[in-house]
Image: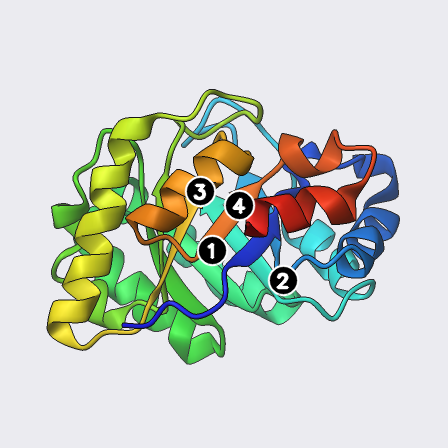
Amino acid sequence: MAMGNIKIAPSILSADFAKMGEEAESLERCGADLIHCDVMDGVFVNNITFGIKMVEDIRRHTALPLDCHLMIVHPEKYVERFVKAGADIVTVHFEACRENLAGVLAQIRAAGAKCGAVVNPDTPAEALREVLPLCDMVLVMSVFPGFGGQKFIPEVLDKVRFLRDFAGENGLSYDVEIDGGIAPDTAKEAVKAGANVLVAGSAVFRSADRAAAIAALRG
């Protein structure tokens, strides 16, 4: 599959939560392609961020697609509400869904959003083989989820290669997204391996020039 343009999805985990609407508007002005919303419940991962209301409020401030990454247990209880709140893409973890993953992906699609599956660094991409035909996006975590600012785990690039090759061999057209420790150098490696959606938090929000930071990630 031709990957087309590289898309940058800044993670608002690194934004100022006290002015999230302004932050979303800033990302749109600075050339972001999506806004990555990290939803953490304090159970699936050892951190708590925000939920449905935040997604609903961000939606009013941007026309960019909202890429909602649910790091929560029992995501099937909430996916319709996230879509109703304004999520354009909802990704759920293999580790949270296990044998119910195909059903949750179908649930997201039926609610009207694009759907995707996520694997942690210690889960092989092959675990997703059966559900890949159902996915609009596959997200490879290049850090263990829970906190921003972690160091990129280069071994996950083998999973990106597997997913890109699997798509090509089977006529599939899902996006391959990567999240964790993405900066200009690691972005280049991820794109070379086959990723076409790059999630970056610190690299964008800690920059004095967000537009330049996004352009640098795009390469």
Q: Which residue is mark 4?
A: 199
Mark 1, secondary structure of its residue: strand
Task: Examine the rendered structure and indicate whether residue 153 appears above or below residue 114.
Answer: above
Q: Is residue 152 left or right of residue 25?
A: left
Within-10-Å neighbours for mark 4: few <14, some 14–19, many 20+: many
Comparing labels 3 and 4, the label whose residue is closer to the camera: 3
Q: Residue at x 88, y 50 (%)?
A: 22
Answer whether labels 1 and 4 touch (C-beta < 8 Å): yes
The alpha-carbon separation of the residues under discs 3 and 4 comes to: 13 Å
Residue neighbourhood size for the residue with mark 1, other residues' Cα within 10 Å, grouped as few (<14), some (14–19), many (≥20): many
> In the rendered structure, are the residues bearing label 1 and label 2 in contact, judged by CB atoms less than 8 Å apart?
yes
As measured in the structure, the alpha-carbon distance from the residue carrying label 2 to the one carrying label 3 is: 17 Å
- Mark 1 is on which residue type? Val
Q: x, y percentage for residue 182?
A: 51, 35
Q: Earlier in the sequence, mark 1 or mark 2?
A: 2
Q: Residue at x 62, y 67 (%)?
A: 65
- Label 4 element class: strand
Badge 2 element: loop
* Mark 4 or 2, nearer chain start: 2
